[in-house]
Amino acid sequence: MAAPQAQSPTMAPSDITGTLAAFRRNIDNDARRRQAPTRLPIRYDDDDYLLRFLRVAKYDLTKASERLFNLEAWEDEHLGSDHHPMTAVRFLDVLGSGMLTPLPAPGPLGHTVLFSDYSKFNFNAFRKEHIVQALYYLFEQLLQRRGAQLAGTGVAVIADATNFGWSDLTSEVQHDVIRFLQDRLPVRVGTIALCHHSAVMSMVWGIVRPFVNAKLRERVQLVGSKGDGLETFFGPTQIPASLGGTLDPKGVSEDFNLLREFVDEETEEIELSGAVGPGDFGVEGMTVGPFTFARDVISNTPAHQIGIQQFDIILTVNGKPVTSAGNLVVTPDVTHLSCRVKRTVQDVWNRKLTDLAAAQAERLKQLSLETSRNNNSAPQES
């Protein structure tokens, strides 16, 4: 592999403020031309967010806005109009299977290093939508934590393709993942090194190659079992032991802590309670009657359709906790039911949006004051 020049994440036009202003105008003009609704407009007040797209497009306003609109169109289709992200549990379910794991230290050139263990990951065990959503989810977390570095130098992926077979990857999933990386995510790919690849992997790459843009095509390296040139992008602790490094693939894919850095956990308590009436729990969408301890309480609640195993549930009857996992029959003496749920949630945007909303409100306030001052100081017509 040829050693590229390390790129500074701060390389930018001298007038970055003016470039951002021009980019915002470009976005507005594109939105009007496409008759597209403004999506999460508050994000456009976040310089860091817009700089992701500018950096990856080398400050080409047209290319940057095109990538931004591509990503937002995907968000509308796969995350819904409120852009609510997938849950932390589903994210970890996909990535924890060996698909992609962030390693703690950057590579020699400053790349964020990701490890993929194809020998463990079964692409057919997950819906393709969940695979791409997990990529979105991971890279959003990476960009928030290592934003400038990730946008400036990009990512380097080292993949162990041992035992990779034709059935492990459908062409549909291949195309979706590649399009997502090269056309939507504001992320630069430094290299993708496929180690211990089989003849099948070579055939797969031969099929996919025509659909990959020239830059990404140059960055995919079929390393085989020799590992020549890996040291350019990866340190000894990031190269599998079978190729001369000290990385233990089994340990990486099973080390939950490596993924935890990229998961914001927030414990949210939800209390559903109410007086028991005829066939009613006091909460819309819930009914009383014989039900298995807490399980039906949650599964019958439209807002909480995630797997019950992800919840810590406390059910009380007439103020007393129910600890039995048996059936609970609501008898005439039951006058009040309460179910407290602790759930782990992952929120990509809301926390940041709260901060931005305050900043935006302050900017609007200042703008209003400036407008008022300008109006008051303007000469009056006689």
Image (cartoon, helix red, strand yellow):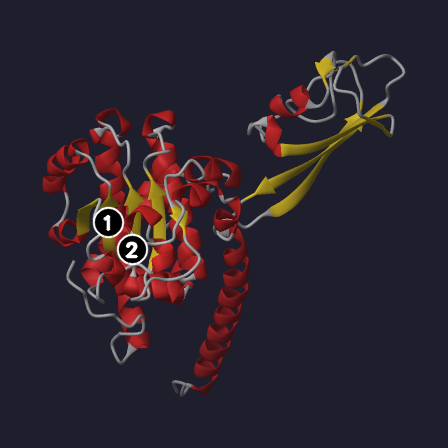
**Horizontal placement of 40 versus 226: left or right?**
right
Determine whether the residue tagged by mark 1 lies in a helix, strand or loop: strand
Instruction: Identify the amino acid type marked 1.
Output: Ala
The reply to whether residue 35 is visible in this rendering is no
Q: Quadrant of residue 293?
A: top right
Q: Quadrant of residue 292?
A: top right
Instruction: Identify the amino acid type marked 2.
Output: Ala
Residue 6, given in percent of the width and then of the height, sits at 25, 70
The reply to whether residue 241 is visible in this rendering is yes
Residue 153, given in percent of the width and then of the height, sits at 29, 64
Residue at image position (11%, 51%) is 214
**Horizontal placement of 252 versus 292: left or right?**
left
Above/below status of 282 relative to 149: above
Residue at image position (19%, 47%) is 223
Q: Residue furthest right?
A: 333
Above/below status of 309 relative to 375: above
Q: Quadrant of the C terminus?
A: bottom left
Determine whether the residue tagged by mark 2 lies in a helix, strand or loop: strand
Around disc 2, counting alpha carbons within 10 Å, would you say few (fewer than 14), some (14 to 19), or many (20 or more)?
Answer: many
Q: Which residue is mark 1?
A: 193
Camera-nearest label, 2 or 1: 1
Tag 2 near tag 1, CB within 8 Å? yes
Residue 90, given in percent of the width and then of the height, sits at 48, 35
Q: Nearer the viewer, residue 208 or 103?
A: 103
Specify which label sits upstream in the sequence, 2 or 1.
Answer: 2
**Horizontal placement of 111 versus 222: left or right?**
right
Q: Quadrant of the N terminus?
A: bottom left
Q: Which disc number belongs to residue 156?
A: 2
Q: Quadrant of residue 379?
A: bottom left
Q: Nearer the viewer, residue 28 or 212?
A: 212
Cα distance between the residues tagged 2 and 1: 8 Å
